[in-house]
Image: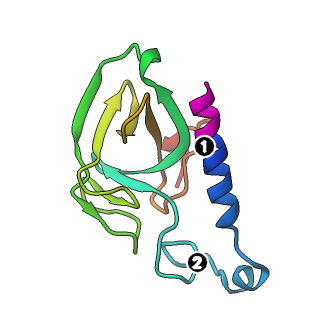
Amino acid sequence: MKRHLLVLLLMMFVLTGCSASDTDKEKNTGETATGHNGSVVEAEYIYVDGHVYINALKTIDKDSIKEDIIKLGEVTKQDDSHIPDEEFESTHIPVGTAIYRIGDNICIYRGGDYYILFEQTLDNGMAIDETEDPSTQE
């Protein structure tokens, strides 16, 4: 429990430090693949089975997993300049990081007692809202 709290606090600290200043917000047109005029995608994305997934900032405790854990492969390419579009390509996830399917979820494992959960995105890299039917999205 302490480890989960520590991970959550660390993620909040990192995300707080990544907020844009007022001048950056004025320059952000949202028209680029990265969502800003810079050349680096800031979120962790991974491309698996023809879909783009984004880090959901959630973990799955190893001891709580009831489904089969299926290793799909490993990250083969890391390119932080665009949202991934090749199988097992990622942003900010090192080459060689293991990729798993746990039930209907895509996860990565970086060691420790948990897997990091990724959510499927729309083509523009925005996470699909779980309350909406993805088949009705344009």
Magenta-colored stretch includes residue 6 = yes
Report x, y in % for residue 104. Answer: 40, 28
Report x, y in % for residue 73. Answer: 21, 42
- The segment highlighted magenta reads 1-7
Report x, y in % for residue 10. Answer: 62, 48
- Outermost residue toward the top? 66
In the image, is residue 55 above or below residue 40?
Answer: above
Report x, y in % for residue 136. Answer: 54, 44
Q: Nearer the viewer, residue 124 or 67?
A: 67
Element type at marker 1?
loop
Magenta-colored stretch includes residue 61 = no
Q: Residue at x 48, y 69 (%)?
A: 41
Q: Which amino acid lies under the numbered mark 1 shown in the image of this protein?
A: Asp
Say which label, 2 or 1, has the lower sequence index. 2
Question: Residue under circle 2?
Answer: 36
| Residue 105 location, quadrant | top left
Q: How many marks?
A: 2
Q: Nearer the viewer, residue 65 or 101?
A: 65
Q: Which amino acid lies under the numbered mark 2 shown in the image of this protein?
A: His
Callout 2 crowding tier (Cα within 10 Å): few <14, some 14–19, many ≥20: some
> Label for residue 129?
1
